[in-house]
Image (tube, helix red, strand yellow):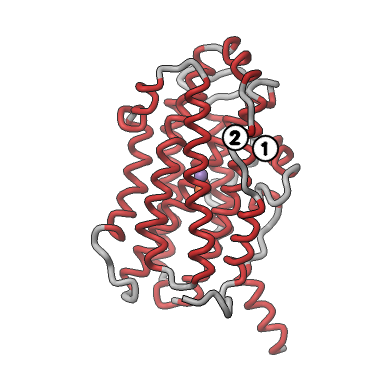
Amino acid sequence: MNLRPIKYQWAYDLYNQAVANTWFPHEIALGEDLEDWKKMTDDEKHAVTFLMSFFNPSELIVNRTLALGVYPYLKAPETHLYLAKQMWEEANHCQAFEYVLETFPVDRAAIFKWHLDKPAIKVKEDFVTNYLSRLANDRLDINSPEGKKDFVRNLVAYNVIMEGIWFYSGFMVALSFRQRKLLRNFGSMIDWVVRDESLHLKFGINLILTILEENPDIVTPEFSQEIRQMIIDGVAMENSYNQAMFPHGILGLNADYVNQYVQYVADRRLEELGFTPHFKVSNPAKWMAAAMDTLELVNFFEAQNTNYEVNSLANKKSETQN
Ligand code: MN
Ligand code: FE
């Protein structure tokens, strides 16, 4: 119950960065976007609302996961500081997406329910909540190898797959409208969300790598293969979701294009976890990286080959030994 001495400096650094990144949805006026909305086709409106209908409840699912499946199992106070800030950010994102849905003239009651009605969305939600329920309901013994593995599985599901792959797929679709000079203020809002999410992802990946480093007993070939397969399965779920988002495709964008981006992002996540890439495709949306580079710390993982805190510590140790 004492912050000092700090054991995981990376977690404390992320907390301070997150506090510096604080923003509020209503700072962004959506009047111009509402004018754009009136000019957009039904397929384009469907894509935006489909996206919002997944994002909005997802923010709450991530929060539930942090509260019930991550926070209770961590002991270091610096990780609790970070998670407290992340939970506020997820609440803020939920409010931001509600603000968008309340601004655009859409059938809100129907759209708020899509995550239950649309199989392609429900499958994704169920995937994440299944892993969480093992931690939230069963109160696993976190000191047993099986408990540690379930903890890591849950981190991979909500952080690497949901926040690190599915969300990036949605960000790309959302920001593609700005590429065409549409929904530019909405795009700015997404920029702020991406900046937050890039820290969530950095925290999650650092956490996973730290757990694996501190618990080498769970790092077996079978477990590694299972984690790799989870990510590949996550990509398949996103492919079906994108088919439902783009039944016909819109100007400059269709399901195949988005799916290739998803595969590209998934390979980056695999590499960040120490795996070899699986899909080996090029980034079809190079403008994404360029758009992201303009914000400090944004797109952390896309822009550079990450040098992890845990690895750099290990490197420093071996340097002094040598
Ligand atoms: Mn979020
Ligand atoms: Fe997040």
The answer to whether residue 147 is above or below residue 264 is below
Residue 208 image offset from top left, x and y in percent: 49, 64
Which image quadrant for residue 247?
top left
Q: Mark 2 or mark 1, which is nearer the start of the sequence?
A: 2
Residue 301 image offset from top left, x and y in percent: 64, 52
Residue sitting at x 46%, y 36% = 55
Mark 2: which amino acid?
Answer: Met
Residue sitting at x 42%, y 26% = 244
Residue located beneath label 1 in the image: 288
Q: Viewed as shown, does residue 80 lie left or right of 264?
A: left
Which image quadrant for residue 222?
bottom left
Residue nearest the viewer, comparing 19 with 192: 19
Please tell me whether mark 1 sits on a helix, a strand or a loop.
helix
**Spatial CA span between label 1 and label 2:** 7 Å
Residue furthest left as drawn: 138
Residue sitting at x 48%, y 23% = 102
| In contact (CB < 8 Å): disc 1 and disc 2 | yes
Tell me, yes or no, if residue 208 can be seen here: no
Q: Viewed as shown, does residue 39 lie left or right of 204?
A: right
Screen quadrant of the C terminus: bottom right
Residue 275 image offset from top left, x and y in percent: 54, 60
Residue located beneath label 2 in the image: 172
Picture mark count: 2
Tell me, yes or no, if residue 41 can be seen here: yes
